[in-house]
Amino acid sequence: MRDGFTFAVVGRDEAATLSTALGFALDAAQPGDRVWFVDSGSTDGSARLAAGLGAEVVAAPVGKGRAMQAAFDRCRTGHLVFLDADYEWSERNIPAEVRAEAVRTDADMVVGTYDEAGRRRVVMPGVYHPLVGALAPRRSSTSPSR
């Protein structure tokens, strides 16, 4: 396994939900790992909140894709785990599970997904699953989707 993980919580003006996403990332991190809030031009105090919670704030251009690219360009650890800053709730720590699966399999890429009861998913089956299937045609884990 390559050394270290960076958990990059990406968002813009997400002060209302940021503590949940950062809490999961901080709980998933182990010694030597990094936790970032990749701030895509927030004006609501998100950066100050993230720093107060113990995350390193990384300034990034406006736009999720640009913010993710800024994190990718800056990351020097072996693994980069992205989380949305509007991650409101989960029974499980998905970043921790992604980390554990990457360690278990020594995979180059681990993709986590989950289902929200009562929420209709259009992007997941129509775009996301075919895209991931094309990028990683064989599933390395027998774990059920979450």
Image: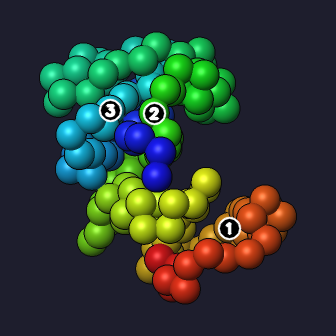
Q: Position of residue 91 (x, y in %)?
A: 27, 71
Report the front residue among 123 and 38.
38
Q: Nearer the viewer, mark 1 or mark 3?
A: 3
Specify few, some or many for label 3: CA neighbours under 10 Å numbering under 14, 14-19, or 20 or more: many
Q: Position of residue 134 (x, y in %)?
A: 83, 64
Mark 3 lies on a secondary structure that is strand
Residue under circle 2? 77
Q: Is residue 137 left or right of residue 94?
A: right
Q: Which mark is residue 124?
A: 1
Q: Which badge, 1 or 3, comes first in the chain's sequence?
A: 3
Disc 2 marks a residue whose amino acid type is Thr
Residue 98 appears in the picture as rendered: no
Q: Nearer the viewer, mark 1 or mark 2?
A: 2
**How far is mark 1 from mark 3, CA to CA?**
28 Å
Q: Which badge, 3 or 2, comes first in the chain's sequence?
A: 3
Disc 3 marks a residue whose amino acid type is Arg
Q: Is residue 10 above or below residue 105?
A: above
Q: Are the residues flagged by discs 3 and 2 in contact, CB closer than 8 Å?
A: yes
Residue under circle 3? 34
